[in-house]
Amino acid sequence: VADRDALAELLAGIPAERPLRAVLHTAGVLDDGVIDAITPERAAGVLRPKLDGARNLDELTRELDLTAFVLFSSLAGTLGGTGQGSYAAANAYLDALARHRRDLGLPGTSVAWGLWGGDSLASGAVAERLIRDGLPAMDPATATVALRRALDHDDTAVL
């Protein structure tokens, strides 16, 4: 999704008789580190999939008749997180993009997920730190039901 040309080509290949009806942007990369250890390359590696990917999806699908445009954000964008400056910034952008789309009369929902149980983006020491800090892992089945409810209620932001 971060490669605009590749995404445009993919979207152009969707048959007119089966139009795209919803977008779920779930891309993300974790690369935690203290501020003096974050190089521009490391920051870009975290920002590109979430921020550039979301911007590309927004711009390339803006004229489509979508029923949903869902951005998988993180509580890091709202609460911050130790060593997660780039990740928090990318997720704050997703939250703002959902609000911006709503202001334009377009669908937009940002879901600020916490730690998913099972195999997830955060694992090992990161997951242990989040649990130790009082953020228990979510059961994936329960989280999926919560997502459905959020979409049914047409919320802009969900924590």
Image (cartoon, grey):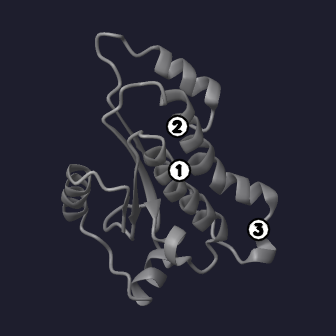
Residue at point 51% right, 77% down? 79
Q: Quadrant of residue 5?
A: top right
Labels 3, 2: front one: 2
Residue at point 36% right, 26% down? 65
CA separation in Å, label 1 and label 2: 8 Å
Q: Mark 3 is on which residue type?
A: Ile
Q: Mark 2 is on which residue type?
A: Asp
**Residue 32 percent coordinates (x, y):** 63, 70
Residue at point 48% right, 41% down? 104
Q: Is residue 20 above or below residue 53?
A: above
Q: Is residue 144 above or below residue 81?
A: above
Q: Mark 1 is on which residue type?
A: Leu
Residue at point 64% right, 76% down? 83
Instruction: Name the residue carrying label 1.
Output: 97
Instruction: Name the residue carrying label 3.
Output: 38
Of residues 6 and 111, the one drawn nearer to the viewer in this rendering = 111
Q: Quadrant of residue 137?
A: bottom left
For the C terminus, the image quarter is bottom left
Label 1 Cα neighbours within 10 Å, binned few <14 / some 14-19 / many ≥20: many
**Residue 110 percent coordinates (x, y):** 41, 55
Instruction: Name the residue carrying label 2.
Output: 58
